Amino acid sequence: MRKRSFGVLVAAVLLLTLAVRHPSADIRILTHDTADLSPHRVQAALDMGLLAVNILVTWTAAKVAR
């Protein structure tokens, strides 16, 4: 009987934690903003970052394979 009441208590606490709305992050990159006069610069910066990561992965993979 004790285990059952403890299980019901745990289930109730879990349901209450699910019912409470947790804060959520709103992370957006607004390149479509009308005040943004240079969305192409943002895209170029992202492309350069991806290129740098690609080169880094390629370079480290060649070093690890040896």
Image (cartoon, rainbow, N blue to C red):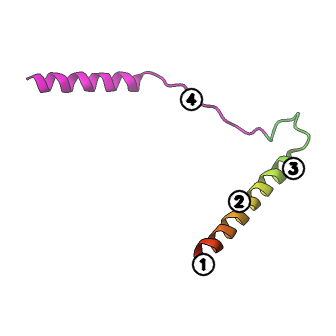
Is disc 2 placed on a helix, strand or loop?
A: helix
Of residues 51 and 26, the one drawn nearer to the viewer in this rendering: 51
User: Upstream in the sequence, badge 1 or badge 2?
Assistant: 2
Disc 3: which residue = 40
Between discs 3 and 2, the one toward the N terminus = 3
Looking at the rendered image, the disc whose residue lies closer to the viewer, 3 or 2, is 2
Residue type at mark 4 is Ser
Look at 66% across and 35% down and name the residue there.
Answer: 27
Element at badge 3? helix
Amino acid type, label 3: His
Which amino acid does the dot numbered 1 rest on? Arg
**Mark 1 surroundings within 10 Å by alpha-carbon count, few (fewer than 14), some (14 through 19), many (20 or more):** few
Between disc 1 and disc 3, whose residue precedes?
3
Q: What label does residue 66 carry, if any?
A: 1
Coordinates of residue 5 in the picture (x, y in percent): 15, 21
Q: Are marks 1 and 4 in contact (CB under 8 Å)?
A: no
Image quadrant assignment for residue 55: bottom right
